[in-house]
Image (spheres, helix red, strand yellow):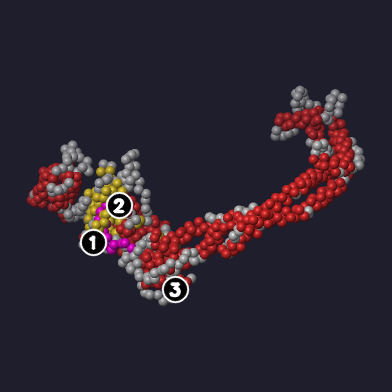
Amino acid sequence: MAQETKLSKKLPETLEAEIKVFADGLPYWSKYMAEKWLSGSVISEEVTTAAYFFLLEELGLKTKSERQTLVIKYDVQKSGNHKSDLLFAKVQNVEGVNALMEGQTIEFGNHLTIIYGANGSGKSGYTRLFKLVFYSKSKEEILKNIHIDTGHKAVSANFSFTSGTDSISLTLNDKGKAEFTQFSVFDGKSVIRHLDQRNEFEFRPSGLAFFADYTAALAMVEQKLNADLSLKKTGSTAQDLADLFDGESEIKSFVQALSSKSKAADLQKFAPFTEIDKAEKVKIDKTYDELLLASKDKEKQISQLLTIKKLLAENKLAVEKLNQHFGIDYLKKIRNAIQDCLDKESITKAEGVESFKTETILGVGSEQWKNFIIAAETFARMQDPEQHTYPKKGDSCLLCQQPLSPDAINLIANYWSFIKSVAEENFNKSQEILNKLETGLGKFVFDLFPENNTLTDWLTERYPEALQSLKDALAQQKTLCETIISDVKAKKIVDHTEVLTSLEHYKTIGNYIDTVIASLRENEQSKELAQLNAKKTYLAHKEKFNTHLAKFETFLENQDWIAKAGKANFRKAKTDTTYAEKALSDKYFSQKYIDAFNDECKKMNGNFGIEISHTGSAGKSYRQLKLKGNNPNAVLSEGEQKVIAIADFIAEMRLSEINRGIIFDDPVTSLDETRKSEIAKRLVEESLNKQTIIFTHDLVFVSSLIGHCADIKATHVCHWIENRSGNPGQIWLNNAPSYEKEYRSAEPAKKYYNEAKKDDCPPAQREFLLKTGFASLRTSYEVLVINDLFKNVVQRFNERVSIEALNSVFFDSGLIDELQDSFGQCCRYMEGHTHSDKYAYKKPEPNHLNEEIQRFEAIRAKVKKFKKPATEQ
C-alpha cells in the first residue's frame, strides 16, 4: 500500500507533524477536506461538495477550475470548538422527564458536586437526561410520566455553562453542540458496556479524531458520486435504444453495440438525414408499395399452399397412428391376448368353479356368486378377528345359525381357497386387458376426409385418385377394426391379414406443394421486393436515428462518465486512512491509555490482570477488555467489575483533551465500605482536575467523599433530592444530611433570610428561599443534637463509637421539649414534609424565618452551656 510505504519512512516525532505528512500525500480533492479540518474548520456540506467537484475534475468528468495551493497547517487550538475552561454551571426548567418535579434547579460546583437522595427520589431521571445530551455508553429513552394519563409535556431542559467570563445557555435542541461533547456520564448500565463489548475510543488526542471525521467526509463524497452514478445508470440502455427501430438494419445493429468504448464521432456515420435521403425514401416507399400490390396474389397462393401442407401433415400423422394398430404385429398381439384369456379361464374352471356347481344352486361361477363368497368371507373374519379360523368344528352357519356339518365346513373352506386362488386372479387380469383393447379400438376415427373440409376439397380438385385410394384403405381398416372388436368380445381366435394405408400419396403431394411454393418465392419480383424492403428499412431507421440523435449522444456521455467514475477508489482511500489512524494511535495513544488504565486500577486496588486489545475500522480505534481470554464480567465479582469499569472510564477521560466533566450515578452500589472509600478517594482526587458530579443514595459514600475532600482540601457542594409525596425531583440546594460542619450554626438559614427580605426579591423566589431556609434550619437542629446534645458519642458514618464521651451526655426533659417544639416549627413551614395537626403547614414570611433563627440560637446557647449536674457526674 502506498500509505504504508509512506508511514514506514522515518517520521517526525509529533502526532501533529505525522498527520500533516498524511494529509500532504492525499489527492487534491481529499487534501482539500483535510486542510479545512486541520485548520479548525468544520467539514461542512459546502466543503464536501467542493471536494466532490475537485474529484470530478481529477476523473476527467469536469473542466478543471483554477485551484488555490493547499498548505497543511495543523492548528491544534482551532481544531474543534471545545473550551479548555468549560464548566457546567446548572440545569433547570426540566420538563417531561419521567415524573420529575418541574421548576427545580441544580447548581454545580467547580470541582465536586454531590446530589444525595434516597431510592426513588429522582436521581435516575436526571441521569437519563444527562445521558441524552452528554456522552454515555448506555443511552436510554426518556419515558413520559406513567402516573398521569394526559398533560404530558415534551422533554426539555436548560443547561448553563461558563467559560472564563462568558455564560453559555443551551437547550435540549442544542445537544449536538461542542459543549455537550465535553462531559461524560457513567452509570450501572455502562458497566457491562465497558466489560463485555468492543468500545470505541470517544475521547482521544484531537489529532486522532481527524481520521474518523475525514473518513466520514470520504463517505459523504462517495455518496455524492454514487448518487450521480445512479442517475447515469437509470437512463436508457443500448437495448432500449435499439428497440426504437422496427425490423433489422445496419443502424439497429450499430445502436445495439453502443458502449463506453464507442466514440461520439461514430454517431456521425448515420447523420444527418438529408433532403436527398428524404426524396430517396419517398421514391423507394412508392416503388415498394406498387410492386407489393402486384405480388399480393402470389403471396395469397403461398399462404394457401402452406395451410394445405400443414393439414396434409396432420392427416398423415393420423393415418400413421391407425397403421400401427392394423399391422401384423399388433394383430398378433390381440390374438395372443384372446388366447391367454381363454387359457386362464379354462384353468380357473378346472381348478374351482366346476367343483362347486350343483343342481340346487344356480349361477355358480357368476360374478354375483363370486361377490357373495367374498362378502361372506369378510363377514366371517368379523366373528373371530384375532384367530380367523371360521369355520371350525362346532361353528354355526352365519345365515341360518344351524350347526355346520363336517362337509359344510369343508365346502366353506374350499370357497375361501377359491376366492384367493392365483388362477382366478390371473383370469381377471387377462380379461381386463381384453376390455381395454375393446375400448381402445372403439375410439379410432377413420373418417379423415370429411365433406366440406379444406384438405378434402383441395385433394378432390387436384388429386382425386389419391384421395379415393386413401378413403378405400381407411374403410378397409374400419371394417377390420369392427371385426376385431367382435372377436375380442366373443373371445374368438381368428388370424386376420394386416390392412395398411399407403403413405406414398402424402410424399407425392408434399413434394408438389414444396415445389410450387419455392417457385413462387424465387420469382424475380420477390427478390426485388426484398431488396426494396431492406433499403426502405434502412432509410426509415436513418430518419429515426437522427430524430433521436440526442438520446444516443447522452447515452455515450453517460457510459463515458460511468467508466471514468469507476476509477475513483474509495475503498483504498478508506483502508489507507484506517491504517494510518491505527499506526499513529498505537504510537501516540494506545500505550498511554494502557498505562492510564493500569494506573487507575492500582489507585482503586483493582489489579486483576486485565488485558487490552486494540482494533481499527473506518478511521476509528476500538478496545476490548479481557481477563485470560474471557470477558471480565464472566469472571470477576460485581464489586471487581465495577472497579474495572470505572478505571476504564476514568482512564479514557484522563487522556481526553476535551473532556471537562464526569457524571456518576450511584457508582458504588452493592460495594463494601472499603471499596466505597477507595472509589470515593479516587473521584475526589479527579475532581481537582475536572468537574465531578455524583448522584448517590449511599450516606456512607457521601460521608467518605466529604471526608476525603477534607483530607486533600478539595472544595465540594452537596444538594439533597427528595420524593415529595410521590413527586420525585425536589431539589434542596446546599442541604444534605452530611453537611454537619456548615450547619453547626444558623448561618446557612441566615443567608436565605437575607436574600428573601430584599425589596427586589420576587414573591416566588422569596417563597422558595424561605422554604429552603427552614430546611437548612431543620438540618442545623439535627447537627445540634448529634454534636452538642449527644456530645458526638455516635458520629454520622463513622464506624467508631466514642464510648469515653458518654460521661458528658445528660438529657434535660425541659430542654428537649423546647428543642422538639422549635424543630416542629421549622417543619411547619416546609411544604415538602408531612405535618402533624399541631404543626400544620403555614405560608412563610421573612419574619417567621428570622424568629425561628433567633429561637435556634437561643436553644443552641442553652445546650452548649448546659452541663451535667455534679451529683450525676
Seen at 16% across and 42% down, the residue is 844
Over which residues does the magenta segment extend?
Answer: 79-91
Residues at discs 1 and 2 in contact (Cβ within 8 Å): no
**For numbered disc 3, what is the local secondary structure?**
helix
Amino acid type at image mark 1? Gly
Question: Disc 1 and disc 2: Cα gap in Å?
Answer: 20 Å
Tell whether 27 sits left or right of 149: right
Which of these two is toward me, 833 or 509?
509
Q: Tell me which corner region of the image, top left, top right, bottom left or bottom right, holds residue 248.
A: bottom right
Q: Which mark is residue 629?
A: none
Seen at 28% across and 51% down, the residue is 158
Mark 1 lies on residue? 164
Circle 2 packing at 10 Å, graded few (<14), some (14-19), many (20+), is: some
Amino acid type at image mark 3? Lys
Seen at 53% across and 61% down, the residue is 557
**For numbered disc 2, what is the local secondary structure?**
strand
Q: In this view, does 839 lie above or below 183?
A: above
- Among the two numbered marks 1 and 3 on one chain, the one whose residue lies closer to the N terminus: 3
| Residue 116 in sight | no
Q: Which mark is residue 6?
A: 3
Mark 2 lies on residue? 171
Which of these two is toward me, 347 or 296?
296
Seen at 27% across and 58% down, the residue is 692
- Among the two numbered marks 1 and 2 on one chain, the one whose residue lies closer to the N terminus: 1
Question: Disc 1 and disc 3: Cα gap in Å?
Answer: 43 Å
Tell whether 567 sits left or right of 811: right
Question: Disc 2 and disc 3: Cα gap in Å?
Answer: 46 Å
- 616 falls in the magenta region: no
Circle 3 packing at 10 Å, graded few (<14), some (14-19), many (20+), is: some
Residues at discs 2 and 3 in contact (Cβ within 8 Å): no
Rendering coords of residue 268 (x, y %): 59, 62
**For numbered disc 1, what is the local secondary structure?**
loop
